[in-house]
Image (cartoon, grey):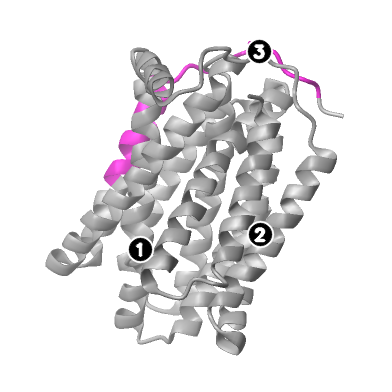
Amino acid sequence: MGRRRILLVGCGSMAGALFLHGIADSFAALVTVRAVAGAAGGMLSGAAVAYVGDYFPYERRGWANGWVMSGIAFGQIIGIPIGTLLADLFGFRWAFLMFAFTMTLATFLIWRFVPQPDVARDLGPLSIRRALANYRDLLRRPVVVAVSAVYFLMFFSIGLYVIYLPTWLERALNVPGTAIASLFLVGGIANVLTGPLAGWLSDLLGRKPLIVTSCAGLGVVMVATTYLVTSMWVAYVLFALAMVMVAMRISPLQSLLTALVGGNRRGVLMSLAVAIGQVGIGLGGAVAGVAYTRFGYASNTFIAAVAIGLMAVLVQRFLPEPRAETTTSTPPV
């Protein structure tokens, strides 16, 4: 259907679902509108990255993805505190309503300024059966299986490391929730500042060296956390380093993935990878809960480091590094 149309439908649907939060009058109604908003978010997750692959030539995608991911991190930095403040002052619905206004603005910006790239489309019938057939065809390729495993391990490790980090810090250092919030603020700023630079470096040096290096660095930071964090100042430094490593990894990886298939399969691949990543973070959170309650937070960090190490091995051995533009795209203006 074209990436631009999906972005418009996704943003518009998200805005509509968020406005419905203002009239949800029961828990069941709230769960329903949350599910609709989640489905709208699912439209956007793969399409946004695939659009970068459509519009920018391969040698510029790291730079472009770096800015996109920094935009996400910056939005979280300012959005979470604003949402919390709105909920405290006016009630929880206002956080969702403000989100609805921002998504309405995003819909307008896409309609006004985002063109449809001139890329090949999948002209097959639109149906659930066809979508599942596309996924099945992709998963017959060993490189796509490797991509799926990479995304799973990446998000699995994040779930293991991050979800119980605030709980552990509160207990180990006896710090309040405001200190934890400031920790994520520092990490978010580090991520914002690193994203474009990491993408630019990956355009110059190649994707795989940055991905593998960031995985190794993140694994070291994860394991070191429970041994080195004796104060919040050390926690700030280590968590900022962790977010730097995350930024060094995500934009080069996404740029690499956009070149593995043609334009008419790019959206399918990115949506598949993101969906598997969401499964990974969910299972990571579940494993984190069991590990934390039975063995302590050090077990979370160790398992997360092993997962991120396996990801580095898969990237190094099974993901090819394209050397030239292999897909049709529109040059940036």
- Identify the residue shown where x is 34% and y is 22%: 145
Reading the image, the residue beneath label 3 is 120
Neighbor class of circle 3 (other Cα within 10 Å; few <14, some 14-19, many 20+) is some
Residues marked 2 and 1 touching at CB (< 8 Å): no
Query: Amino acid type of disc 3?
Result: Ala
Q: In the image, residue 162 lies at what x, y percent?
A: 38, 61
Label located before the other in sequence (2 or 1): 2
> Which amino acid does the dot numbered 1 rest on?
Ile
Identify the residue at horizontal 73%, vertical 48% (top origin): 107
The residues bearing labels 3 and 1 have C-alpha atoms spaced at a distance of 40 Å
Mark 3 vs 1: CB contact within 8 A: no
Residue drawn at (59%, 53%) of the image: 14
Question: At 45% across and 71% down in the image, what residue appears?
Answer: 235
The image position of residue 20, as x and y in percent, is 56, 64
Seen as rendered, the residue at the extreme right is 333
| Residue 67 in view (yes/no) | yes
- The residue tagged 1 is 163
List the residue tagged with mark 2: 74
Mark 2 Cα shell of 10 Å, populated few (<14), some (14-19), many (≥20): some
Q: CA distance from mark 2 to mark 1?
A: 20 Å
Which amino acid, by three-letter code, is at mark 2?
Phe
> What kind of element bears circle 2?
helix
Region of the chain picked out in magenta, as a range: 306-331
Task: Say which of marks 3 and 1 sits in front.
Answer: 3
Evaluate whether residue 191 shows in this view.
no
* Label whose residue precedes the other's in the sequence (3 or 1): 3
